[in-house]
Amino acid sequence: MKISVVGTGYVGLVSGTCIAETGVNVACVDIDETKIEKLNNGIIPIYEPGLEDIYKKNVEKGRLEFTTDLGASIKDADAVFIAVGTPPDEDGSADLKYVLGVAREIGKNMDHYLVVVTKSTVPVGTSVKVKQAILEELEKRGEKIPFDVASNPEFLKEGSAVNDFLKPDRIVIGTESKRAQKVMQRLYKPFVLNGHPILFMDITSSEMTKYAANSMLATKISFINDIANLCELVGADVDNVRRGIGSDPRIGNKFIYPGTGYGGSCFPKDVQALIRTADEFNYSLDVLKAVEKVNYRQKEVLFNKLYKRFEGDLKGKKFALWGLSFKPKTDDMREAPSLVIIEKLLEAGASVAGYDPVAMHEAERILGDKISYAKDEYDALIDADALILVTEWSEFRLPNFRVMEKLLKSKIIFDGRNIYDPEELAELGFEYFAIGRKTK
Ligand code: NAD
């Protein structure tokens, strides 16, 4: 089989590479010429564990290529996947200009039957718009080439994207065409043979599934953050409460870790977009509106603790910040809680020395010289008034507290991910602040 994947970001690049791994010929397309040049020269523009090995292997085997030429990429293809970004519009709804732009390009260039698959996260009704855009272009050309649209939302997680794609919990495919279903069934057969199920459904339900999944996950996070804040007020420890509720299988112990609020390129925009979709149908998604509100508040919780501890006097103070990416094992900083905290610290007249195992380049691109960049986690601590831990990279879990106390100006830690033991830190003489925990 042969496919084209348009958009070589976190989703497109991982999907294309992993599908090539099953023996399919894949052309990955992007309008960003620099990105394509890098990929053609052996450089992967994103950090994703495990991606480099299978990328190299499939390029060497001649199954994976990179191009800016969408027209050439769909010649002889069985299917074309649209995996471009769907950022929030001004009102929070998903901006479809990139998706529909690609659909028009497909309509301008296709010359045989194709399954056009939306892999981007798109609101209900988008596949109809994709179909319409292609039909309009075909009409302009005076052509009547058959095609089908399908929806195949992606559930991979940055940081474990390759593993998630190769071993999905489920593959969701929305299509109303038997012909398209056959193509998709064939393409995903290697995954099904490895025990990963395909759930076929109508397109609208498939589009809805992705938003419902991310909204449910965001809800879990805001719920536990809300409970954590209450725990602090009543004198409970959210870590005990988390373990206490997580052992009930109806609740489950995953995704109920309190922190500094959810970020990243998906949850914030997808929650917003689903609220807007409901608004369009005159329905108010009240639970999700609260999820969003709690999340905005949570992104400031750590800063507020710090502000209170230093009695509002942050001018001239220096803070070490560990973890810049929005979560561990990725260099993605879109909507990262670290950015909110940094902005507030700078506004208050403090300076920040940041360190992240992989997101330093991305941080420099976004923040420039607003902060200083440490060469490792200990370097960031030199003469800092406190450490602020924002992202729980594994290398931050067991640091040498004896070394840390020598480097820090004062022995204060603000832990936004509850990764340290309050008792141990108290014994070592650290002042320790966490989220929803008894720390003294
Ligand atoms: P991204 O921003 O990393 O990548 C998008 C790519 O599309 C960019 O390289 C951009 O240059 C390219 N592009 C834009 N317009 C184009 C065009 N006309 N032709 C060719 N290429 C074009 O985005 P992403 O994180 O990979 O997300 C893509 C979609 O997948 C979004 O809808 C997102 O919500 C969804 N999604 C993302 C994740 C994730 O973890 N990042 C997970 C599941 C679903």
Image: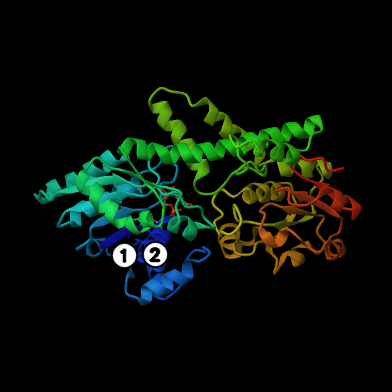
Q: Is residue 215 above or below residue 71?
A: above
Q: Tag 2 or tag 1, which sits nearer the N-term?
A: 2
Residue at (12%, 51%) from the top-left corner? Answer: 141
Residue 53 horizontal/vertical position (percent): 47, 71
Query: Which quadrant does the N terminus fall into?
Result: bottom left
Please name the residue that numbered disc 2 is placed on: 17
Q: Is residue 256 above or below residue 409?
A: above
Q: Could you say which is closer to the camera, residue 312 or residue 325? A: 325
Residue 202 seen by the camera: yes
Residue at (73%, 31%) from the top-left corner? Answer: 230
| Residue that extends furthest to the top in the rendered view of this protein | 282
**Is the C-beta of the residue carrying label 1 under 8 Å from the nearest atom of ligand 1?**
no
Residue at (64%, 46%) from the top-left corner? Answer: 340
Please name the residue that numbered disc 1 is placed on: 26
Near mark 1 (Cα within 10 A), the count class, few <14, some 14-19 or many ≥20, is many
Residue 233: name its quadrant.
top right
Q: Is residue 243 above or below residue 320?
A: above
Mark 1: secondary structure: strand
Residue 37: name its quadrant.
bottom left
Residue at (38%, 72%) from the top-left corner? Answer: 58
On the picture, is 267 further left or further right than 56? Answer: right
Q: Could you say which is closer to the camera, residue 288 or residue 15? A: 15
Residue 354 horizontal/vertical position (percent): 69, 60
Mark 2: secondary structure: helix
Query: At label 2, which amino acid type do we have?
Result: Thr
Query: At label 1, which amino acid type do we have?
Result: Val
Label 1 close to label 2 by CB (< 8 Å): yes
Residue 92 seen by the camera: no
| Residue that extends furthest to the left in the rendered view of this protein | 142
Residue 326 horizontal/vertical position (percent): 59, 52
On the picture, is 21 further left or further right than 161? Answer: left
Q: How many marks?
A: 2
